[in-house]
Image: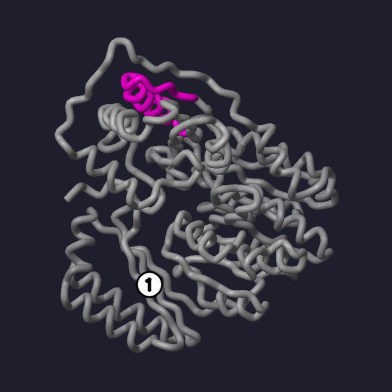
Amino acid sequence: MAEKLFGTDGLRGIANTYPLNVDFCVHLGNILGQHFCTAKRRIAIARDTRISGTMLFSALAAGLTAQGIDVLDLGVIPTPLCTTLTPELDVDMSIMITASHNPYQDNGIKLINSAGDKFSDKDTTKVEALLQTPYSPQYDAQKIGQIIELDCGLDDYYDAVNALADADSLHGLKIALDSANGAFADILPYVFKYFGAEVISLADSPNGYNINENCGSQHTEILCQTVIENKCDIGIAVDGDGDRIIICDETGQRLNGDQIIAFLAKYMQAHNLLKGNAVVSTIYSNMGLGKYIRSLGLEHYASAVGERYVIEKMREVNSNLGGEESGHMVLSDYSRTGDAMLAAIVVCRGIKESGKKVSESFPVFTPFPTEAHNLRFADKATIDKILENQQVKLCIEQVKNRLNGHGSLIIRKSGTEPVIRLKIEDEDAAIAAREAILLLDCLNKYA
C-alpha cells in the first residue's frame, strides 16, 4: 500500500525535511511532469510568504522543466487567486505552495487541476503510488522547459471583488484587518480602503518567518484588543494563504466560521443570491447551525471534513454557499475555493446595510454545548494503533449510542498532523462534558 502523504488539504510537513525537502520535490516535479502535464505541457506554481517557498518552488520547477514542462511562476498570491486563475492560464494544473494557517517552519503542497479544483482522492492516490514506485526518470536533452514569470492576475481578481460591492460602499465602517503576514498582506488593506472603510492594518509586513506568528485566523488576541482600543466596528483575520476568515465584534468577541456561514446564508437569502435553497457545511459544524439554517426554510447539507468535500457537496446540491467552522467560506459565484477576502466583503456589506453593531447581529444562532479536544501524539502510527484498538472502538460506539437523537460525536485523525480531533455536542452541556471525559480517558489509556 502506498504511503499516505496527502491529507484533506494537500501535503504538509516541516520544510527541509521529508517529504518537504528538495529531493522529494524534484521527484514530485518529475512525476507530475510525466503523468499529469501531458496536454498543454504547462504548469503554474504560486506560493505564500514562507521563507521556504522559493526553495520548494525551485525544486518543483527543476523536476518539471527537466521533463520539458514550462513553469509559470505566479509569485506570492493567495490560494483563492491561484485556483481562480488556473482555468484561464492554459495549463495542465497548478501547485500552491503553502501550509495555510501553520507556522513558518511548516510548508505544504496543494495540487490543483486544470479546472481550478483541488486534486480528488483518486488523483492524489495515483500521485502517492507513483512516488513510491521504483522510478528512473527519463530526460531528453531536446526537451527542456523554461520558467516564465507571470503577472499574477490581480486585475481579474479585483473585477470579482467589484462584483460584490461598489466603491465607497463600506464608507463609515472602521475595520481592523489582520493579514497574517501572508499572501493577502498587500491586497486586503488596499481593497477595503478602496471600498471606503477606515482601515487599521495588522500583520501586513511579511519577512518569511512571521507568517501566522501571533496573528491571523488562529491567533486573534491582538486583533480583538486592537478592535477594543481603537473603537473599531469589526475585526477581520485571515490566514497565511488567504482561504480562512475569522471575525470579532466591536467588543472583541471572537466569532467562528459557523456563525459566519449563518450570517452569509441569511444575507444571501434576503438578497435572492442563494442558489438551490441550500447551504453546505461539514459534519464538524455545530448542530445549532443546521437547526438555524432549517429555520430559514433552507436545506442544510453536511459534507465530510475538508474544503474540497464542501465544494463537491455544493455542486451536488446546486448550492453557491458553503463553509467550515475553521473559517473556509466558499462563495462559488465568485471563487472556486474558500476566499477570506470575498467573504469579509459580504459580511461587512451586510453589517453596513443593517445599521446594527456586529454584536447586535452576532451570534446569529445559539450553538449546542460542545466539548472539543485535540489530542496530540508522537506520530500517526500511534494514532492508528489507538483507533484500531477494540476497547476504544467499543467505547466510541457506546458514546454514540448514548448521544443518539440529541447530540453527536465526531472523532477523526487530522489530515495534516499527528492529532486526534474529538468533538462531542449535546443540548445538555453536562452530558457533553461527561461523555468527553469518558472517551478521553479511554483514548489516553490505550495510547
Looking at the rendering, in which quadrant would you find the C terminus?
bottom left
Q: How is the image coloured?
A: one colour
Q: Residue at x 33, y 39 (%)?
A: 14
Q: Is residue 149 left or right of residue 306?
A: right
Q: Name the residue under label 1.
A: 410
Q: Report the span colored magenta.
A: 50-72
Q: Where is residue 249 in the image (x, y as percent from the top left)?
A: 69, 61
Q: Quadrant of residue 36?
A: top left
Residue 23, horizontal then vertical, whole percent: 26, 28
Q: Residue furthest top?
A: 142
Q: Would residue 54 be counted in the magenta stretch? A: yes
Q: How crowded is mark 1: few (under 14 residues within 10 Å), some or many (20 or more)?
A: some
364 vs 233: above or below: below
Report helix, strand or loop for mark 1: strand
Q: Residue at x 64, y 34 (%)?
A: 186
Give, as a three-letter code, the residue at label 1.
Ile
Q: Is residue 281 above or below residue 247?
A: below
Q: Where is residue 72 in the image (x, y as percent from the top left)?
A: 49, 25
**Percent of width and height locating residue 170:** 81, 50
In the rendered view, would you say 310 is above or below 284?
Answer: above
Residue at left offset 64%, top offset 42%: 202
Instruction: Please name the residue shown 51% across and 57% down the image.
Output: 311
Count of labels in the image:
1
* Left or right, 318 with reference to 432: right
